[in-house]
Image (cartoon, rainbow, N blue to C red):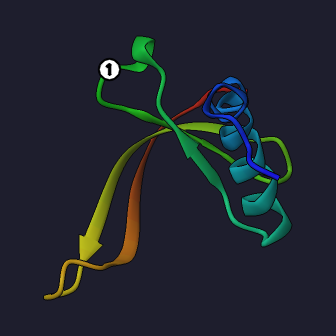
């Protein structure tokens, strides 16, 4: 059964929710960026705490991400 492109595109908003759910299942924080936050990112913890952070990704020599470094700026809730 073929899936239409329109159906896939109509469900794109679900990808962020699925990524958030999976991060929490693994016990990891979920990062996202809102336009109102400028260069800062929001870091949501599985327990519901929400932080504003600076977000940096370290890469190995082959360009693969190996570490996420976030610098706390502000507690939002």
The single residue placed furthest to the front in the displayed view is 1
The image quadrant of residue 56 is bottom left
Query: Residue 18: x, y in percent?
Result: 77, 48
In-front residue for pair 21/8: 8
Q: Is residue 21 left or right of residue 73?
A: right
In-front residue for pair 57/19: 19
Circle 1 residues within 10 Å: few <14, some 14–19, many ≥20: few
In this figure, which residue is indicated by the disc labeled 1? Answer: 38
Q: Is residue 31 above or below residue 8?
A: below
Quadrant that contains the C terminus: top right
Residue at 68% over, 42% down: 15
The image quadrant of residue 46 is bottom right
Q: Is residue 35 left or right of residue 75?
A: left
Q: Is residue 55 above or below residue 67?
A: above
Residue at 69% over, 52% down: 19
Q: Is residue 59 above or below residue 30?
A: below
Q: Secondary structure at mark 1?
A: loop
Picture mark count? 1
The single residue placed furthest to the left in the displayed view is 61
Query: Residue 44: x, y in percent?
Result: 68, 44
Q: Is residue 20 above or below residue 8?
A: below
The image quadrant of residue 3 is top right
In-front residue for pair 6/40: 6
Residue at 45% over, 36% down: 41
Residue at 20% over, 78% down: 63
The single residue placed furthest to the bottom in the displayed view is 61
Query: Residue 6: x, y in percent?
Result: 65, 25
């Amino acid at each position: 059964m073929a899936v239409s492109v329109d159906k896939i595109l109509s469900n794109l908003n679900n990808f962020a929710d699925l990524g958030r759910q999976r991060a929490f299942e693994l016990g990891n924080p979920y990062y996202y960026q809102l336009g109102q936050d400028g260069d800062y990112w929001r870091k949501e913890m599985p327990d519901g705490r929400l932080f504003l952070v600076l977000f940096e990704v370290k890469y190995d020599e082959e360009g693969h991400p190996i570490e996420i470094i976030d610098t706390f700026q502000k507690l939002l809730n």
